[in-house]
Image (cartoon, coloured by chain):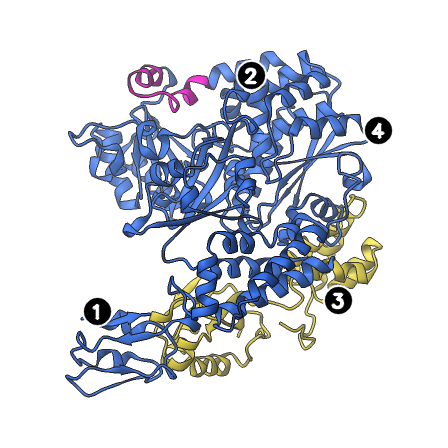
Amino acid sequence: MMTIEELNKIKAAKEELVLVRRVVSEQGEELSKKTGYRKQVLVCGGTGCTSSGSKKVVEALESSLAQLGIEKEIYVVRTGCFGLCALGPIMIVYPEGCFYSQVTPDGVRRIAEEHLKNGNIVKELLYAETVHEDGSIISLNETRFYKKQLRVALRNCGVINPENIEEYIASDGYQALAKVLTSMTPEEVIDEITKSGLRGRGGGGFPTGRKWSFAKAAEGEIKYVCCNADEGDPGAFMDRSILEGDPHSVIEAMAIAGYSIGASKGYVYIRAEYPIAVQRLSIAVNQAKEYGLLGENIFGTDFCFDIEIRLGAGAFVCGEETALMTSIEGHRGEPRPRPPFPAVKGLFGKPTVLNNVETYANIAQIILKGSEWFSSIGTATSKGTKVFALGGKITNVGLVEVPMGTTLREIVEEIGGGIPNGKKFKAAQTGGPSGGCIPACHIDTPIDYDSLIALGSMMGSGGLIILDEDTCMVDISKFYLEFTVDESCGKCTPCRIGTRRLLQFLEKITSGNGEPEDLEKIEELALHMKSSSLCALGQSAPNPVLSTVKYFRDEYLAHINDKTCPAGVCKSLMYYEIMPGLCRGCTLCARNCPTKAISGQVKTPHVIDKEKCIKCGLCVQNCKFNAIVKK
Amino acid sequence: MEAKTKYAFTGTAAQENQLKEVIERHKNQPGGLMPVLQEAQEIYGYLPIEVQSMISEGMGISMSEIYGVATFYSQFSLVPKGENRISICLGTACYVKGADKILEAVENKLGIKSGECTENRLFSLDCTRCIGACGLAPVMMINDDVYGKMTVDKVDSIIDSYIKKSRKGGDK
C-alpha cells in the first residue's frame, strides 16, 4: 500500500527531471544542474515515429553515447507522441529545447558528437521552423504548429516516459486520486465533473457528470467502469496516442470514476491493432498495482479498484457502447436497444459507466485545477479542449489539441500549415464514417459539438481529414459507405440493407449511370436509416452522403447529368487525351501503354483509343512534353 | 474467402496442452471466450473446427456460439495463413502487364492456388485488387515488402530468399 507521503516523496525525487522538459532555456539550465544529467534527449516512440524508424534512432543514439563515453551525462527517454507525425522520427534535446525532425541514424551520430558532447547545436538538422532567419532558435511553443494548441488531455504525451510510473507521479500523477479518496465524497466528485461541463469525447458528447450520476443512482451491489479504447474510425489516432504517451492518466481517472459510482472493477476495451498502446497500458496497469495505486485499500482507505484489459478483435461496431459491452461479455459484438442504458443495466447486466480514453484523460486535471478552470476554456456548450487527428491533404499531418471553439481556418491554415502543393482547400471531413464534410464556405465556423451538428456533421472521436480540390466528394462518400457496408454487424435491417443500397446508388453515379431522381431516393433512404437503425453506426452511416449532397450537390449533378467528374477522380467518367499541338510523336507513351491503346506514327501526334484505355495514367507519367491531359 | 476443409489439422499434443491451460485460466472468467479464442489463434495460427470444438468442450459453450463469435470478428481466421503472406496484384494495369503469368509462376513454385496455403504453412497466396502501384506494374507483395516490375524469372529467387530467412527454412 502506498501512503500520500510516499507518493509525494516519489514526486519530489523526480520532479526536476521531468520539469526540465516543460520549461525553456535559462530556467531549464538551472534545473538541469540539479538533476544530475547535463542533457536529456526525448525520442518519440509513438506509432507514427516508430514506423518511420525511431527505434533505430534510439539504438544509434545509445551506441553513439557509449562510444563517446557520455552515456552517464545524457538521459535518454522514449516518450509518446509529440504530435507532429509528418516530421518523424522526432527528437528533442533539453534544456535547450532543440527540435530535431526526420532524424536518421547518421544524423543522430552527428547530433551526439557535435551537440550532446561538444555543445554545438546542429542547426541544419533542426525542424526548419524553429530556426530564426538570424540563426537564433525559436521555442517550440512559438512555432505555428504548437502556438495555438492547448494541451490538457495530451499534457504528458511527448514529455514523460510512459513506461515509468514515477515520471507520471512527478507530473502530479495520482494526486487527483489521493485528493478524491481522502477529502471528497463521491457526490462532490460527480458535482465537480458536472460543473466542469466535460462532455464525452468519443463522439456523442453526452455530459460526463450526468452519466456518472445516473450510474451512481442506479441500484446494485456490483457496478463497473469501462474505458472505450476501440478507436475504429479510419484516420483517427488520438486515443491510441494518449494510451501510448500517458496511460496512467486513464488508469487514475477510471479509479476516480469507480470511487464516484461505487465500482471496484474496471475494464479497458482496446483494439488489438494497437500493439504499442496495449503493451504500454499493460505495463502501466502492472506498475500501478505494484505501487498499490490499484488494488486493495488504496491510500489506506476502504476503496478497492482493479483494472482488466480486454482486446478487441477487429470489429468497428464494438466502438458502440452496448456492442462493446456485449463483446467484453464474450459474444458477437452486436449492439442492443437502449433503454435500458448502460448506466442502469450495462456490462454483465450491472450499472456501468463507459467513457472514452480522451474523456478520462481530462478527469485528473479537472479535479486538481477545479471545474472553474476547465469551464473557462471552450465555448458556451462545449468546455475544455479537443484533440484532433489531422490528416489528408495537409502539410502538418499529426495530433493537435485546441480549445473548443477554435475555427477550422486556424486549424487548417495556421496549425496545419495549409494545403500542400498550392492546392485549394475544398472541405474538411470530421467524424469519420459517421460524420460529414464541412465545405470551404464554413471554414470560419468555431468548432464544437453543436456547431458541427448544425452543419450536418459531428465531432466523432476527432478525425479531421482535409480534402483539396483534387478530391471527388462523391468518391469520398463511396469510400465511407464501403467501410460501413463492411462493418455493419447485420443485426438490424435498416443498417444492413440500407448501407448496401446507398453504396449501390453511389456506385451507379460514379460509374456514369446515375439518374436525376437518384438524389431524392438517396435522401429518402437516408432519413429512414437515421430514424430506424438500432445503433449509432446505422443511424449515422448516411451522414457522409447527406452532407456532401447538401454542400456539393453540383458535383453529384455533374456526375449524373453531364457524366463528368469535376475532380477527375472517378475513372469511368474521365478519359485521357493527347493534345495534338504538344505531341512530338516520340512514341514513348505508346511503348509504355500496357493495353496498346495509343497509336501513331513516329514524329506525328499520337491518339488514344478510349475503348482500349484502362486509365492507368502511365502515359502521362512518361510524356516529356506534358502533351497528355486528363479530362 | 471460402472456408476450405482440405487443410489437415496438424495440431500437436503440446499445442493441445497449451490450449487446455489457456481454457483453464479463462474458464471461470466472465466473458472469457474472446481471450481464449485470441490465445488459441496465437497457438495454432488460426481457428480450425477441431480447435473450436476443443474450446467448446473445455468452456462448456455451444459450438454454434463459438462459431458465431469466431466468424464475427475480422481478426479471427478459420483457414491457416502462411508465415509469409504473398499477394499478387490483379488490378487491371498489373493484369495486362502479365500479372497472371507471375501468379502462375508463383503457383507452380509453391504448388498451391490462390487463396491457399502451403502444407508447411510457410507461404499463403492471395490475389488482391489494385494496390495503387500501377507505375510499378506488375506488383507482388510479400508481407509488407513491395516487389515492383516483376518478371517470371525473378519469382524463384525472391521466394527462395524468404525460405532462407524463415524459421522453418529448409524443410519445404
Pointer 1: what residue?
A: A626
Question: Principal SS element in the magenta part?
Answer: helix
In the rendered image, residue A430, in percent from the top left (x then y), is placed at 50, 45
Per the image, label 2 sits on a secondary structure element best described as: helix
The residue at the point 34 percent across, 33 percent down is A92
Amino acid type of the residue that numbered disc 2 sits on in the rendered structure: Glu
In the rendered image, residue A56 lying in the magenta stretch gets the answer: no
Provide the secondary structure element on which disc 4 rests. Answer: loop
Q: Tell me the chain of label 2.
A: A
Q: Callout 4 environment at 10 Å: few (<14), some (14 to 19), or many (20+)? A: few
Both marks 3 and 4 on one chain: no
Give a yes or no on whether discs 2 and 1 share a subunit: yes
CA gap between label 4 and label 2 equals: 31 Å
Tell me the amino acid under the disc marked 3: Glu
Q: The yellow chain is which one?
A: B
Q: How crowded is mark 3: few (under 14 residues within 10 Å), some or many (20 or more)?
A: few
- Label whose residue precedes the other's in the sequence (4 or 1): 4
From the viewer's perspective, is A393 left or right of A181?
A: left
Q: Residue A29: say if magenta.
A: yes
Q: Nearer the viewer, mark 3 or mark 1?
A: 1
Q: What stretch is highlighted in magenta?
A: A15-33
Instruction: Tell me: residue A138, above or below residue A56.
Output: above
Nearer to the camera, A548 or B84: A548
